[in-house]
Image (cartoon, rainbow, N blue to C red):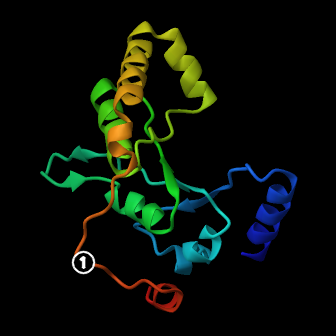
Amino acid sequence: FDFHRELADYLHSLNSNVVMSINSGVQSWINTSAYFGIFLPMIAKKNDIIFIEDGHFPAVRENGILCHRIRDYKIANQLGQYAVTYSHYRDPDHFYRSVAESMAFNHGHFGHLGHLGNALEVIKDEEKLKHFGKILTWGRKHSKVYEDSKANSEVAILRNFSSMAFDC
């Protein structure tokens, strides 16, 4: 945690507009304190964005179970951060659901739309490129709707470092 704080302080001394992001392999279904020694509130003060490495893309599974990443967004929101979640193109339905979920629960942000290899694949495929253009146009038009969204929860779970690190 000291290294992250020192690095953030140094980078901000060079440029106060630097955006700090950490990709600690955060997966909300894993006890990150016990598995990785990462307690997000300790690094959140020097961070702006958290990468969420969770492959649970929004969908209704064959057995009727709703799969989503709302918890990931709520964790980031509670820490005063934005979450970067994967919204890569697999097929149109997957792509639209992933981006819409990110926009709805992440203050109007699209999420991570792809890596360079994925982008090159999309550029070469007119059908995929059409879907990217459609969602980007829609997002620019409607993102303000989500910017000031707030969680409306009445239930909370205490997750302090001690309880998370030792409650495996």
Left or right: residue 47 compared with residue 11 = left
**Residue 64 place in picture, x, y as percent:** 12, 51
Vertical placement of residue 125 versus 85, above or below: above
Residue 115: quadrant of the picture: top right
Could you tell me which residue is drawn at 74 percent across and 50 percent down?
A: 18
**Neighbours of disc 1 within 10 Å: few (<14), some (14-19), many (20+):** few
Residue 18 seen by the camera: yes
Left or right: residue 40 compared with residue 89 = right
**Residue 40 place in picture, x, y as percent:** 56, 72
Residue 87: quadrant of the picture: top left
Which type of secondary structure does the marked residue at label 1 adopt?
Answer: loop
Vertical placement of residue 78 versus 82, above or below: below
Residue 42: quadrant of the picture: bottom right
Could you tell me which residue is drawn at 13 percent across and 51 percent down?
A: 63
- Quarter of the figure with the C terminus: bottom left
**Residue 108 place in picture, x, y as percent:** 40, 42
Residue 98 seen by the camera: no
Could you tell me which residue is drawn at 54 percent across and 79 percent down?
A: 33
According to the picture, the residue beneath numbered tag 1 turns out to be 155
Residue type highlighted by circle 1: Val
Left or right: residue 132 compared with residue 154 = right
**Residue 24 place in picture, x, y as percent:** 61, 61
Could you tell me which residue is drawn at 34 percent across and 26 percent down?
A: 91
Q: Nearer the viewer, residue 102 or 31?
A: 102
Q: Nearer the viewer, residue 39 or 63?
A: 39
